[in-house]
Amino acid sequence: MELHTQIIWLFILAIPIACVAWTVTHEEVFREPREYCIKCSKEGKTILKRKFFYLFTCEYCFSHYVTLFFLILSGYQLLLTGWKGYLIAGFALVFVANAYMSVFALLRQAIKKEKTEIKVMEKEVEDKEADK
């Protein structure tokens, strides 16, 4: 595979990795299992149990395992062939996926802030109208 094709694959393949990792570690659909994992990661009797369950609560940690799945699924290798190409691809995909998740988190935060500011302004307008 040519280098420019590998780079395109890198940025596209990181999208579903980021999507899966974010969804499992942040979204409401996985809230109950995530809360269970958080509890087990804090109260587990062994360090192995605590670390295992922590993997499902941290988007960075979980993205490594999602990346491994997608590497097996796609056979994507970066720069070199064989295990070295998989290793380089794995870390590059984790990096790009986490950059995507960071941008997404910032966007969500900005949207949430804007919605809160709008609610405050609407309340002020309602209060002023009620005073008239």
Image (spheres, rainbow, N blue to C red):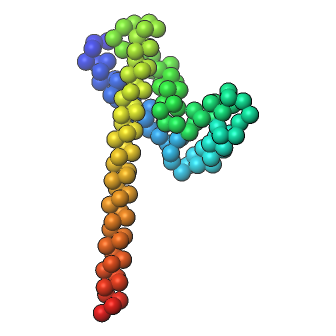
In percent of the image, x 47 and y 32: which residue is there? Answer: 60
Q: Is residue 4 left or right of residue 63?
A: left
From this view, report whether residue 24 is shown above or below residue 28: above
Where residue 94 sits, quadrant-wise, is top left
User: Number of numbered discs present?
Assistant: 0
Residue 91 seen by the camera: yes
Nearer to the camera, 60 or 46: 46
Q: Residue furthest right?
A: 45
Q: Is residue 52 above or below residue 2?
A: below
The image quarter containing residue 36 is top right
Q: Which residue of the protein is positioned furthest toward the bottom in this rendering?
A: 132
Q: Point out the residue furthest to the left here.
A: 4
Image quadrant containing the C terminus: bottom left
Residue 35 against residue 77 in the figure, above or below: below
Residue 10 rendering spot, x and y as whole percentages: 34, 24
- Indicate left or right for 95 with 67 as reference: left
Residue 85: image x %, image y %?
Answer: 40, 11
- Tell me the quarter of the image containing the N terminus: top left
- What residue lies at 34% left-to-right and 23% top-to-bottom? 9
In screen coordinates, is 87 left or right of 96? right
Residue 41 coordinates in the image, percent (x, y): 64, 37
Residue 76: give x, y in percent of width and height. Answer: 41, 17
The residue that appears at 49% across and 42% down in the rendered structure is 23
**What residue lies at 38% left-to-right and 22% top-to-bottom?**
92
The correct choice, above or below, for 18 with respect to 92 in the image is below
Tell me if residue 13 can be seen: no
* Quarter occupied by residue 124: bottom left
